[in-house]
Image (cartoon, helix red, strand yellow):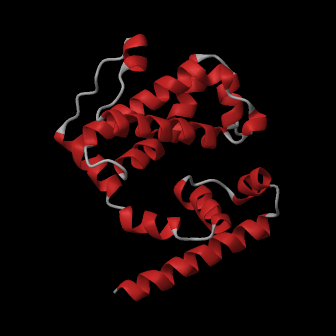
């Protein structure tokens, strides 16, 4: 049986947080790399997001929504703070004693590749909310249909239709772009 994200946040041991981190690290990094042209800033914001999650995980409440939504809410706020201030706020990183991440050329190239999906991300954003949510959960977050259906309190068939219709709409739009 797979441990849920919510259970991982509820457990205060290091291994639970490590599993949560492993599940979401690349997704959070991709989120930032699509929204900032600076790979080092994307890496810093990713580190700050997980540092904030580590510090605040006792405050997470299942009733408020999915753990992934809570995580990306924190990520969004970190990005907004960085954009407002013009730099990444490193208070959480300092408080936890985490050094600034030194990126290699390979790391920067990998982050840049994650950011190249802007056109697809824009197409997803243009979809109706129900299709966008289903595609994001299934394609971006690689979650199973039954898990998505439980979270959305609907049937697996409905989720499959939303994904199928959303992808079909994106294909039509992409065909119109060429």
Q: Quadrant of residue 85?
A: top left
Taking the spot 42% from the left edge, 81% from the top edge, the residue there is: 174
Residue in front for this viewpoint, 145 or 117: 117
The C terminus is located in which quarter? bottom left
Decide which of 102, 63 is in the foreground and name it. Answer: 63
Please name the residue shown 35% across and 53% down the image: 114
Image height of 106 relative to 122, above or below: above
Instruction: Identify the residue at horizontal 55%, vertical 26% (top origin).
Output: 53
Quarter of the picture holding the N terminus = top right
Residue 144 in the figure: left or right of residue 14? right
* Left or right: 33, with 121 as reference point: left
Residue lying furthest front = 84
Identify the residue at horizontal 55%, vertical 80% (top origin).
Answer: 169
Instruction: Where is residue 154? Give x, y as percent.
Output: 82, 61
Please say if 173 is above or below 116.
Answer: below
**Residue 50 image point, x, y percent:** 48, 29
Q: What is the residue that sits farthest to the left in this orientation?
A: 105
Residue 177 % position (x, y): 37, 84
Count the numbered circles shown.
0
Q: Is residue 69 left or right of residue 91?
A: right
Of the pair 101 and 64, the residue shown nearer to us: 64
Q: Position of residue 145 (x, y in %)?
A: 70, 60
């Amino acid at each position: 049986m797979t441990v849920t994200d919510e259970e991982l946040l509820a457990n205060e041991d290091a291994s639970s947080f490590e599993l949560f981190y492993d599940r979401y690290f690349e997704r959070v990094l991709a989120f930032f790399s699509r929204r900032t042209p600076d790979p080092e800033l994307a890496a810093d914001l990713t580190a700050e997001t997980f540092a904030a999650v580590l510090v605040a995980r006792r405050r997470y409440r299942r009733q408020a929504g999915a753990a992934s939504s809570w995580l990306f809410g924190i990520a969004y706020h970190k990005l907004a703070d960085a954009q407002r201030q013009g730099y990444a706020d490193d208070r959480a990183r300092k408080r936890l004693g985490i050094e600034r991440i030194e990126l290699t050329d390979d790391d920067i190239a990998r982050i840049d590749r994650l950011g190249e999906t802007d056109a697809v991300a824009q197409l997803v954003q243009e979809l109706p909310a129900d299709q966008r949510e289903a595609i994001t959960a299934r394609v971006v977050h690689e979650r199973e249909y039954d898990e998505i259906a439980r979270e959305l309190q609907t049937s697996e068939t409905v989720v499959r239709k939303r994904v199928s219709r959303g992808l079909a709409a994106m294909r039509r739009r992409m065909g119109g772009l060429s």
